[in-house]
Image (cartoon, grey):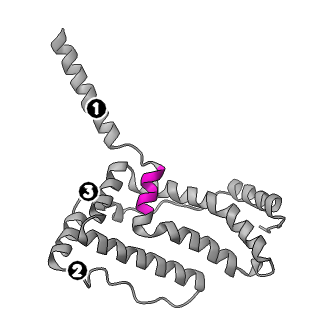
């Protein structure tokens, strides 16, 4: 009887450890990957840039635009966290990316990613012509390139082959946000 219980306990611990390893990423894990990739600041820059540059907001005061940003940013950040959570799938995948970021090659790779993301956002917000892409590997030595190549062959790098999940708010969310902006900012937004 005790052997059967031991086998059941072993099977249960193996099953539970597999479930824990594949746990849905926490908000903290998602924020970590967003920071590594440069999306933490990019999200805020997109919202601020779109509100500050959009024609329909040009007649509003800085205080009104700031209030609108304060209303729009939290739900957009939450949607982006959910999209990154879906994209990466589990905490172990994010942990693998974080470990890669601690290597010299990974640190340079992520610095290039952040630079590319921020340049893309700046171009989108400013409407300027695209700049040349960042050269991720230009300043890497052979060991750093090897670190990048090894990571790119890992299961965690499969994230790069996935489509980014849809982040568009649905009609009800837009209606709720428009009502919230009207109530808290005193600004009527047309749909």
Crowd class of label 3 (few under 14; some 14 to 19; many from 20; radius 10 Å): few
Is label 2 or label 1 in front? 2
Q: Is residue 38 above or below residue 83?
A: below
Q: Position of residue 27 (x, y in %)?
A: 48, 51
Residue indicated by mark 3 = 155
**N-terminal label among 2 and 1:** 1
Q: Is residue 86 visible?
A: no
Taking depth in this image into account, of 96 and 83 the one nearest to the observer is 96
Q: Are marks 1 and 3 in contact (CB under 8 Å)?
A: no
Is-magenta flag for residue 159?
Answer: no
Query: Residue drawn 35% across and 65% down?
Result: 160
Crowd class of label 1 (few under 14; some 14 to 19; many from 20; radius 10 Å): few
Query: Residue drawn 48% across and 59% down?
Result: 165
Quarter in which the C terminus is drawn: bottom right
Q: Position of residue 59 (x, y in %)?
A: 81, 81
**N-terminal label among 2 and 3:** 2
Crowd class of label 2 (few under 14; some 14 to 19; many from 20; radius 10 Å): some
Residue 94, numbered label: none
Q: Position of residue 97 (x, y in %)?
A: 32, 60
Our reading of the magenta stretch's main secondary structure is: helix
Mark 2–mark 3 Cα distance, whole angstroms, equals: 23 Å
Looking at the rendered structure, the secondary structure element under dot 3 is: helix
Which range of residues does the magenta coloring cover?
27-34
Residue 15, numbered label: 1
Mark 1–mark 3 Cα distance, whole angstroms, equals: 21 Å
Q: Is residue 114 above or below residue 181?
A: below
Residue indicated by mark 2 = 140
**N-terminal label among 1 and 3:** 1
């Amino acid at each position: 009887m005790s052997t059967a219980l031991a086998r059941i306990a072993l099977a249960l611990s193996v099953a539970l450890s597999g479930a824990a390893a594949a746990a849905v990423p926490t908000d903290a894990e998602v924020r970590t990957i967003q920071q590594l990739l440069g999306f933490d600041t990019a999200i805020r820059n997109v919202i601020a840039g779109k509100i500050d540059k959009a024609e329909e907001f040009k007649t509003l005061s800085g205080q009104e635009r700031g209030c609108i940003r304060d209303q729009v940013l939290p739900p957009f950040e939450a949607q982006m966290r959910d999209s990154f959570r879906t994209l990466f799938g589990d905490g172990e995948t994010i942990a693998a990316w974080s470990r890669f970021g601690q290597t010299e090659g990974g640190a340079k790779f992520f610095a290039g990613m952040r630079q590319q993301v921020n340049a893309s956002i700046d171009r989108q917000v400013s409407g300027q012509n695209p700049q040349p892409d960042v050269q991720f590997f230009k300043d890497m030595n052979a060991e750093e390139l090897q670190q990048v190549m090894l990571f790119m062959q890992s299961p965690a790098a499969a994230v790069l082959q996935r489509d980014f999940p849809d982040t568009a708010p649905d009609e009800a969310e837009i209606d709720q946000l428009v009502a919230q902006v009207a109530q808290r900012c005193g600004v009527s937004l047309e749909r």
